[in-house]
Amino acid sequence: MESAGRGMIAVGFIIGIVLLTMFFGDQLEDQRNPNRDPRSQIQAGITEVMLDQNRWGHYLTAGTINNRPVEFLVDTGATDVVVPASIAGDLGLTRGRKGRAMTANGKVTIWSTRIARLTVGDIVLHDVDASINPGMGDMEILLGMSALAEVELVQRGDTLTLRQFN
């Protein structure tokens, strides 16, 4: 009987650890990307998406490329939307003209491409210039100026609002 009690305590302890891991794992993910389901509103022909800054001061958000879910890092220093080569094929992107680009990690070879449909919240963009970068790991896609130039950006405090005028 005593060993059954110990077994129940061990099972309870393991369940508690699993639940704590799930809870804190979700908390950490919310700190890394607080915009996993970006808030949108549409009023008077204007679509707004409000993004919260993460704990490191960046704006990460969920979105889609060609109807496939992705994660974007808003990067006003990137000329184009930049997609890691490791996931470009999964997103239906094909390599176009080969070129060179200067990145934070130095010069890299890239390939031009076009994104048929890109979304962030309720903002929808079509035929967006992009580049495929084989030097990027499996990280966020850089949401660069080829997409951001199509919307108005307003930053107040730790919130970035993207506005699309329809």
Image: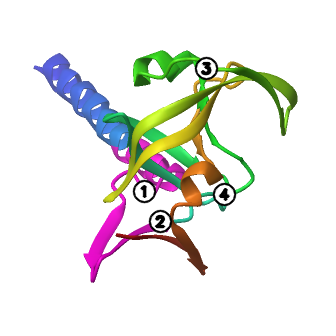
Which comes sooner in the sequence, label 1 or label 4?
1
Residue at mark 2 to residue at mark 1: CA–CA distance: 6 Å
Mark 4 or mark 3: which is in front? 3
Q: Residue at x 82, y 24 (%)?
A: 108
Query: For the magenta stretch, what is the residue range?
Result: 23-51
Which comes sooner in the sequence, label 4 or label 3?
4
Marks 4 and 3 close (CB-CB < 8 Å): no
Which label belongs to residue 56?
Answer: 4
Q: Position of residue 151 (x, y in %)?
A: 51, 65
**Amino acid marked by disc 2:** Leu
Q: Position of residue 64 (x, y in %)?
A: 38, 41
Residue 96's image quarter? top right
| Residue that mark 2 sits on | 51
Q: Position of residue 44 (x, y in %)?
A: 27, 83
**Amino acid marked by disc 4:** Trp
Q: Residues within 10 Å of mark 3 (few under 14, many from 20)?
A: few
Secondary structure state at the residue bearing disc 4? loop
Secondary structure state at the residue bearing disc 3? loop
